Image: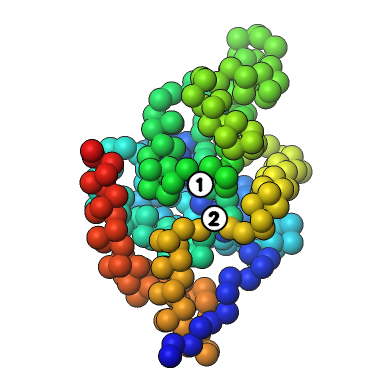
Amino acid sequence: MPFFGKPAPPNEFRFVMVGKTGAGKSRVGNTILNTNAFTFALDAKSVTSVCRLMSSENRFGKKIDLVDTPGVFDTEKDNETVQIEICRCISMTTPGPHAILFCVQMGRFTDQEMDVLEHYIKYFGHNILNYLVFVFTHLDSWRESYKDRGVLVPSEDVYIKSLPEKAKSYLEKCNNRYICLDNRAKEEEKEKTVKKLIEKVEEMLSKNGNSCYTDTNYEEAEKILQTMMTVNSLRDEIKNSESFLNKVNLYFKLVFQKIYLKLKT
């Protein structure tokens, strides 16, 4: 009989950031964790090449594990790359994320943003919308674009109302959970925004029975993790190990091949 280790701690939040390359996910991660752990670029080229996990031990009373994804769900990514990075994301956030942060740059909202979201939903199912929060990035640049034209800067609500119908439809399915983030704001303003995000997630989880998102894939990953744990092993060390990732990847190889075939039909 394998030793079944401790479950994920109750004061831990696990977040996954998704969004197309250049949406500003890495900067969002730095603001949420109050760190400079995630490297970011000033152009559209992605600096993040693989899913990366960073943590903050005490953010408003919570340990936050946050996974930055390298544009995994950009539709031009090949199947093998998507499979490996999804497995990496699952292994890093088992037994499941508490929130999926869909990062979108404020301004012109294109079909590419929705393609990334819909690609994500195809892999994880529509139930993921119960855990989704829209994070509109580059609030500062959006404001500056109006100031440069000598036009009164509208409210954030006006921007939300101007979104394409498809985007508003998804936002409604998420109970209009969103924040607008200025990563260059003063620390006090950024802290208020992060606190607002935490409160939205807590409210969302309350409606979800105080449970994280999970599915059969996450349940299987958790079983694999538990079988690898011993009396003296630390959960985080096993969860972040290459050996655990390899076992998860091996198990899901056939699973994701079947999903990929469905996506192509």
Q: Which residue is mark 2?
A: 213
Query: What colouring style does the render use?
Result: rainbow
Circle 1 crowding by C-alpha within 10 Å: few under 14, some 14–19, many from 20 = some
Total labels: the figure holds 2
| Residue 4 percent coordinates (x, y) | 51, 83
34 on left or right of 22: right
Q: Earlier in the sequence, mark 2 or mark 1?
A: 1
Q: Secondary structure at mark 2?
A: loop
| Residue 206 percent coordinates (x, y) | 70, 52
- Which image quarter is the C terminus in? top left
Write down the quadrant of residue 14 in the picture: bottom right
* Residue furthest to the top: 150
Q: Please name the residue shown 44% across and 46% down the image.
A: 125
Q: Which residue is mark 1?
A: 128
Write down the quadrant of residue 150 in the picture: top right
Mark-to-mark CA distance, 2 and 1:
7 Å
Q: Please name the residue shown 50% across and 58% down the image.
A: 214
- Which image quarter is the N terminus in? bottom left
Please name the amino acid that badge 2 sits on: Tyr
- Can the viewer see residue 66 in this picture? no
Circle 2 crowding by C-alpha within 10 Å: few under 14, some 14–19, many from 20 = many
Q: Please name the residue shown 62% across and 19% down the image.
A: 161
5 on left or right of 259: right
Relative to 243, does residue 16 appear above or below in the rendering? above
224 on left or right of 60: left
Q: Please name the residue shown 58% across and 71% down the image.
A: 8
Please name the amino acid that badge 1 sits on: Ile
| Residue 99 percent coordinates (x, y) | 57, 50
- Can the viewer see residue 158 in this picture? yes
Whether the residues at callouts 2 and 1 have beta carbons within 8 Å, the answer is yes
